[in-house]
Image (cartoon, rainbow, N blue to C red):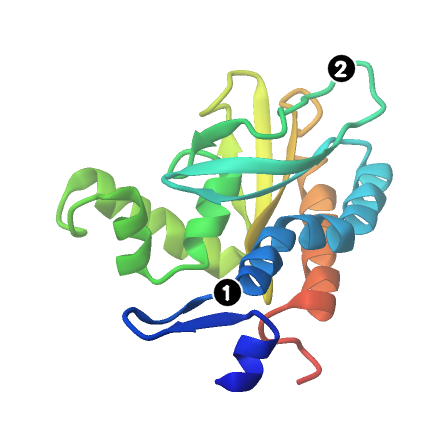
């Protein structure tokens, strides 16, 4: 405990026991920056490869918050705002994040009753599908004319979603498999670098 206190990772006090120290809190604050620094080159590469916008998001309360966006070069493009919050349950990125959780944790995050209710039952079926195929889809649900595909990435820095929101006219049945393939490959690269359970371990 003394070594942790010397590094300001914890603070010990006579009356209130052990508390988190300022160095630990600074480290927590850097997590957001660190994941962006690691992920940004891979997100840029994905965007360049598929010609679409790529967004990195995380859970913020009961919503999906975008923390980094690589904007596509195309004239017709989808541009989510960094810091914008969208519903977890209806967005591809939100569903990808919820699929990383156990069903009970996902329902708790959304403050939904157990799976007996119609809404939660449908959501749990969708999360099961996302886990099975490896990615989530928002097909004109959040924004008409926009299709979003997303994968969840469980890292040592937290859980994140990589989303590709694109105009529905370009994500036709023929274009979707290519985007999904590249999106899954990007996820695998990120997991190889910062995954909680890296493939080589």
Q: Residue 189 lies in what quarter of the image?
A: bottom right
Residue 87: assigned label: none
In-image side of 193 versus 121 (left or right): right
Q: Residue 103 lies in what quarter of the image?
A: bottom left
Label 2, on which residue?
76
Q: Does residue 154 appear in the picture of this structure?
A: no
In-image side of 11 versus 40 (left or right): left
* Image location of residue 79, percent across then percent down: 68, 22
**Residue 194 vertical position relative to residue 93 in the rendered view, above or below:** below
* Image location of residue 9, percent across then percent down: 54, 70
Q: Secondary structure at mark 1?
A: loop
Query: Looking at the image, do the residues carrying marks 1 and 2 touch, with CB atoms under 8 Å apart?
Result: no
Query: The C terminus lies in which quarter of the figure?
Result: bottom right
**Residue 157 vertical position relative to residue 168 in the rendered view, above or below:** below
Label 1, on which residue?
21
- Along the polypeptide, which appears first: circle 1 or circle 2? 1
* Image location of residue 76, percent across then percent down: 76, 15
Choose between 118 and 71: the one closer to the eye: 71
Q: Residue furthest front?
A: 14
**Residues packed near mark 1 inside 10 Å, few (<14), some (14 to 19) or many (20 plus):** some
Q: Residue 71 lies in what quarter of the image?
A: top right
Choose between 176 and 92: the one closer to the eye: 92
**Residue 50 vertical position relative to residue 41 in the rendered view, above or below:** above
Q: Disc 1 versus disc 2: distance between alpha carbons?
A: 48 Å
Choose between 106 and 30: the one closer to the eye: 30
**Residue at x 50% of width, y 65% of height:** 21
**Residue at x 40% of width, y 59% of height:** 101
């Amino acid at each position: 405990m003394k070594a942790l206190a010397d590094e300001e990772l914890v603070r010990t006090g006579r009356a209130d026991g052990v508390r988190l120290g300022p160095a630990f809190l600074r480290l927590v604050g850097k997590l957001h920056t660190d994941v962006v620094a690691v992920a940004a080159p891979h997100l840029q590469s994905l965007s360049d490869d598929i010609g679409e916008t790529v967004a990195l998001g995380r859970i913020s309360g009961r919503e999906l918050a975008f923390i980094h966006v690589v904007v596509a070069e195309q004239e017709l493009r989808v541009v989510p705002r960094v810091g914008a919050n969208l519903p977890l349950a209806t967005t591809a990125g939100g569903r990808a994040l919820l699929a990383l959780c156990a069903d009970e944790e996902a329902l708790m995050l959304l403050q939904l009753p157990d799976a007996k209710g119609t809404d939660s039952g449908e959501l749990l079926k969708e999360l099961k599908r996302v886990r099975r195929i490896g990615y989530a889809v928002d097909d004109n649900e959040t924004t008409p004319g926009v299709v979003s595909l997303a994968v969840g990435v469980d890292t040592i820095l937290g859980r994140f979603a990589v989303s590709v929101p694109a105009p529905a006219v370009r994500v036709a049945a023929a274009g979707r498999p290519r985007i999904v393939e590249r999106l899954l490959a990007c996820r695998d690269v990120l997991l190889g670098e910062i995954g909680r359970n890296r493939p080589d371990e």
